[in-house]
């Protein structure tokens, strides 16, 4: 299998956040687990990536310049209904953020910012469990890494 075929077969995650540090942290954490991570600094760029790539997991910040994260997630739900959507926010206790995300964007999970250690790893484990028909060999590789890298 060529390198480009291997890359296209990897589990793909899209991170939409205006903070470069969040991109770096998610790339590092998800990359160690075998994922290919795409990053966008705003909603419009993120939706463009979602239209071009086969994204299995979308992690989106709630508060960004331009398009609000919940609006991005609601649009993503229409564009790519099989993509698992997650809201990343420092405003977890704010019902004006959380309720539309749950009801309108039908998010899978709400992750606080900053996220607790192990939250992204657990998220990936839970998402993979949701779509067993899609993961075959990649699922096995990711699960092996999750078990191998587990803290003692």
Image: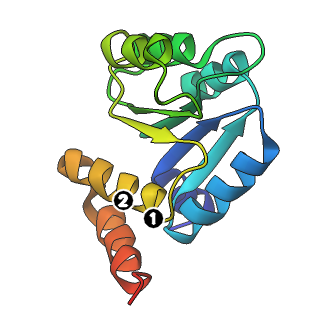
Left/right placement of residue 93 relative to residue 23 reads: left
Residue 106's spot in the image, x, y percent? 32, 19
Residue drawn at (22%, 53%) of the image: 129
Q: Is residue 71 above or below residue 45?
A: above
Residue 17: percent from the left, percent from the top? Answer: 69, 33
Could you tell me which secondary element the residue under label 2 belongs to?
A: helix
In this view, the residue in front, 19 or 140, is 19
In the foreground, 61 or 43: 61
Which numbered dot is residue 7?
Answer: none
Q: CA distance from mark 2 to mark 1?
A: 6 Å
* Residue 148 horizontal/vertical position (percent): 39, 85
In the rendered view, would you say 39 is above or below 34?
above
Residue 146 % position (x, y) = 38, 74
Q: Dot 2, crowdedness within 10 Å: few (<14), some or many (≥20)? A: few
Q: How many marks?
A: 2
On the question of residue 10 being in view, the answer is no
Q: Quadrant of residue 139?
A: bottom left
Q: Which mark is residue 122?
A: 2
Image quarter (top left, top right, bottom left or bottom right) of the C terminus:
bottom left
> Which disc, if any, is residue 118?
1
**Display colour scheme:** rainbow
Q: Residues within 10 Å of mark 1 (few under 14, many from 20)?
A: few
Res 71 seen here: yes
CB under 8 Å between callouts 2 and 1? yes
Residue 145 left/right relative to 126: right
User: Helix, strand, or loop for circle 1?
Assistant: loop
Q: Nearer the viewer, residue 20 or 51?
A: 20
Residue positioned 73% across, 23% down in the render: 42
Q: Residue at x 70, y 47 (%)?
A: 22
């Amino acid at each position: 299998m060529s390198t480009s075929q291997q890359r296209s077969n990897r589990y793909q995650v899209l991170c939409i956040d205006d903070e470069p540090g969040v991109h770096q942290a998610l790339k590092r954490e998800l990359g160690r687990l075998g994922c290919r991570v795409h990053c966008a600094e705003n909603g419009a760029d993120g939706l463009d990536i979602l239209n071009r790539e086969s994204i299995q997991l979308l992690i989106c910040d709630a508060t960004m310049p331009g398009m609000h994260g919940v609006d991005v997630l609601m649009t993503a739900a229409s564009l790519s209904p099989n993509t698992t959507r997650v809201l990343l926010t420092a405003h977890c206790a704010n019902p004006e953020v959380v309720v539309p995300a749950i009801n309108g964007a039908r998010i899978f999970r709400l992750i606080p910012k900053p996220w607790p250690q192990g939250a992204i790893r657990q998220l990936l484990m839970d998402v993979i469990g949701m779509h067993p028909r899609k993961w075959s060999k990649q699922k096995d590789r990711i699960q092996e890494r999750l078990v191998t890298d587990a803290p003692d």
